[in-house]
Amino acid sequence: MKYPSTSGRNSGFTLVEVLISMGIMLILFGLTTPFTIRFYRRYQVITERNLLLSLLRQARTQSFAGAGSTDHGVHIASASYTYTLFEGTSYVARDQSKDQVFEMSTNVTMTGPSDILFKYLSARTSSVSLTFDNGTRQEKIYVNKEGRIDWQ
C-alpha cells in the first residue's frame, strides 16, 4: 500500500490545533492560579513567623548566656518594616554598634508589642503574644515570663 507523499505540502499545526492547545493551557492556568496564590500567601506568613522566632531565640540565648553582660531583645518597627536584634537594657539605651537589622515582609501585618527584652542571665521577660496575618493565614507567637517561646 502506498502512502501519499507530503514532500510537496507544508507540514505543521493547523490553526484549529493551535487554538485547542491554547484553550487547554488557559483553562489549566485559570484553575491552578488561585491555589498557587493562596499557597504563596500562606508561605509568606509562615516565613515571617519563622524569622521572628529565630530572632527571639537568638536574643534569649545571648541574654541567658550573658553575652555582653547585659540584656538582649528584639525591636519591631512596623513603620519601617524592620526587626532589630539589640543589646542593652532597652531599645533606646542600647549599644547601636551591636544592632542587627532584618527586613519585615510588607505583605504581612504583625500585631503585638514593639519590644521584647530578655533579662541578663535569666532570660526572663514579660508575657507577650504576637500575631501575623495577611488575610489568608494567621500565625501566633507566645513568649511567657520565663522566656519560653511557643507558636501556633
Image (cartoon, rainbow, N blue to C red):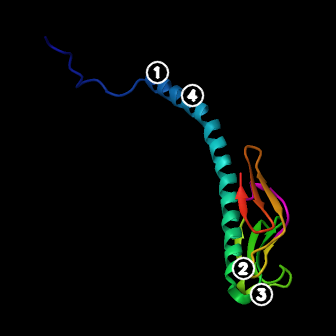
| Of marks 1 and 4, the one in the foreground | 4
Magenta region includes residue 113: yes
Residue 64 at what x, y percent from top left?
70, 78
Distance Cα–Cα, label 1 vs label 4? 17 Å
Q: Residue at x 65, y 36 (%)?
A: 34
Name the residue carrying label 3.
Answer: 95
> Circle 2 is placed at which residue position?
63
Residue shown at the point (68%, 85%) measured from the top left: 67
- Who comes first in sequence, dot 2 or dot 4? 4
Left or right: 29 as drawn, with respect to 11 = right
The label nearer to you, 3 versus 4, is 3
Residue 121: x percent and y percent?
A: 73, 81
Name which residue lies at 68% across and 69% down: 57
Alpha carbon separation for disc pair 1 and 3: 70 Å
> What residue is at 78 percent from the left and 73 percent from the top?
124
Q: Earlier in the sequence, mark 3 or mark 4?
A: 4
Secondary element under disc 3, as helix, strand or loop, is: loop
Q: What amino acid does circle 2 point to?
A: Ser
Q: CA distance from mark 3 to mark 4?
A: 57 Å
Give yes or no for residue 68 being in the magenta stretch. Answer: no
Image depth: mark 2 or mark 4 in front: 2
State the separation of the CA atoms marked 2 and 3.
14 Å
Name the residue beneath numbered marker 4.
Answer: 27
For badge 1, the amino acid type reads Val
